[in-house]
Image: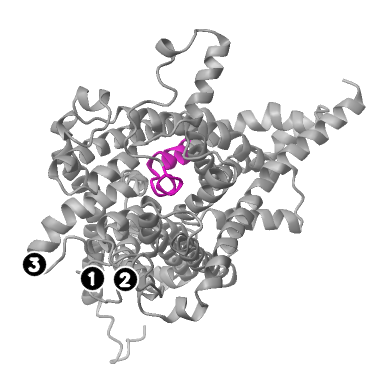
Amino acid sequence: MPSALRKSKESAIHTGLFLCALLSVLTTAGIVWVLASESFHFFGEVSLTDYLFSARWTPLLEPRSFGVLPLLCGTLLVALGALLIAVPVGLATAIYLSEYASPAFRQIAKPVLEVLAGVPTIVYGYFALMFITPHVLQPLLPQTEIFNAASAAIVVGIMIIPTICSLCDDAFRAVPRSLREGAHALSATKLEVSTRVVLPAALSGVVAAVLLALARAIGETMAVTLAAGMTPKLTANPLESIQTMTAYIVQVSLGDTPAGTIEYQTIFAVGMTLFLITLGINLTAQRVLRRFREVYE
Amino acid sequence: MSVAPAQFEPRLQRRRRAGAVFSTACLVVTLTAMATLLILLAAVFWEGWPWLTRKFLANMPSVLSPEEAGMNSAIWGTFWLIGLTALFSIPTGVGAAIYLEEYARNNRITRFIKLNITNLAGVPSIVYGILGLALFVRWLHLDRSLISGALTMSLLILPVIIIASREALAAVPNSIREAAYALGASRWQMVRHHVLPAALPGMMTGVILALSRAIGETAPLIMIGALTYVAFTPGGSFFSEYPQTVAGVCDWLTTAVTDPFTAMPIQIYDWASRPQPEFHHLAAAGIIVLLAALMAMNAIAVALRAWQQRKAT
């Protein structure tokens, strides 16, 4: 091949590949543009203070009110409930797998947890609605409503256990052997090595894992739509029906709200809120990993 | 030999007992987490297995009689959706990974792209649904069609594919690149003939796992307005409705990608959200089909990984 032709072919390929990589930047730009432009119309009619601080969310009923707090409350109730389950379980599992388990046990447990992570969220929603609520929660606590935040929190918790477990496991295994051996040489027991040497040394990884899991729990949609209900309210009672931000977006898009109306624009405003919260948490997690990582030779 | 001072008590027995309690507790928690999977599967199979009949696979959905309802259109919808998603997302995802690993200099633009991809992977799937709704359904007027769904899904799994492919490329030893250059290969020849074949099994594992995530995604499809009661498969039947020519095939394909569609998770969501218990059995049967599809894809990924490891040793 003549070298000029070869050179132009090479640079065409280079450009093509660059455009593929650029597509990801364009996706982000698209998300920001769509959310911002539609939210702009929304905030032209509803003031930001009303949106952020008013305590009622009834955009589809008269008299209308656009206070996002009830949705935020529902989202946090589910997400924090999920962390309450997933952090102890995920952490204990990760400690067991990295510090105690035999390689053979690891080889079985890791794929099982991977499958748990791969189960679609709609299946977890079904599990919450058809199993957790009628067969676990209602026999124990009879006042539980059919749709409730607790069942959603439990399944979202199960869903994010693998995330926490595998990220913490990675962090624990990155702690050098010499640290463990040093502690053992000072006659520390295995428990003391795990909780007073390995855990503090891997703390930045653990914190980042919890933050990433929190972002996932906040963005989780189908399980909470099916199991947690459609009644936005400010409550701390997990046995009541609530509504999360994601479930609200699904509710509107399933209905026949005409495009361009203020009701329709609410999904972009709520979507923007959701996007900013998860982005903030993800960026914080990356910062924690970068800033506070203990570096060992 | 010095004697330990009186106030120093190693309390060895107590500490060892605490250690034993702790390790047992951790084991129990680990086993409980693993058992959850079994409970979940048992609950689904208990409800759904008797309803999983040939009729269920062959019939179209029905609002009136749950006994006659099936998920034929949903199975085909998912099949088309994943096929088209693979067609869009694999070339661009692998291309982006090749650019970042093999071409890009470590400058500000590259670092920005990498940071951007990490953050995109953490964006909730429903936000991609909002993007798809505004961009493909409304702005490009693709309506609630298969192609809108596939494009939205492609954007959703693109970060996953890029990250997995980059890892596979980074695992290729540098000596292979240097050997190719030493024989006078250009950069693209080096990538095309030496690096890509070596990275391919790892890439395929990542790609299959990304696609199996797309199979189960529900929220973005609801956002772009996939329908629940679609009583036909995309494009209809090729053999009975179109001339058996090249033009006929093109015609069939264009009809298929612009048709409205449904998919397995959407159908399951609809059945599960109805109050009548018959529909809950249908939802469970649908979940079994969905999980079977996922298991099949995961099995392929695991087999590829095993094959790759055997080849490496």
Q: Main secondary structure of the magenta part?
A: helix
Q: Which mark is residue B148?
A: none
Which three-letter amino acid code belongs to the residue tagged 1?
Pro
* Separation of residues labelled 2 and 1 (CA atoms): 7 Å
Q: Are marks 3 and 2 in contact (CB under 8 Å)?
A: no
Asked whether, in this view, residue B149 is left or right of residue A31, the answer is left
Percent coordinates x, y for residue B28 in the rendering = 21, 58
* Separation of residues labelled 3 and 2 (CA atoms): 20 Å
Q: Which mark is residue A77?
A: 2
Quadrant where the C terminus of chain A sits is bottom right
Instruction: State which quadrant residue A112 falls in.
Output: top left
Residue for badge 1: A238
Asked whether, in this view, residue B40 is left or right of residue B140, the answer is left
Asked whether, in this view, residue B23 is left or right of residue A41, the answer is left
Question: Could you tell which of marks 2 and 1 lies nearer the N-terminus?
Answer: 2
Question: Could you tell which of marks 3 and 2 lies nearer the N-terminus?
Answer: 2
Residue closer to the observer: B34 or B95: B95
Percent coordinates x, y for residue B87 in the rendering = 55, 31
Residue closer to the observer: B312 or A18: A18
Tell me the magenta residue range: B208-225
- Note whether residue A147 is visible: yes
Residue closer to the observer: A292 or B221: B221
Which three-letter amino acid code belongs to the residue tagged 3?
Pro
Q: Are marks 2 and 1 in contact (CB under 8 Å)?
A: yes
- Note whether residue B201 is visible: no
> Up-down: is B307 above or below A292?
above
Asked whether, in this view, residue A181 is left or right of residue A87, the answer is right
Residue for badge 3: A142
> Up-down: is A53 above or below B170?
below
Percent coordinates x, y for residue B115 in the rendering = 63, 58
Q: State the residue at coordinates (65%, 46%).
A: A23
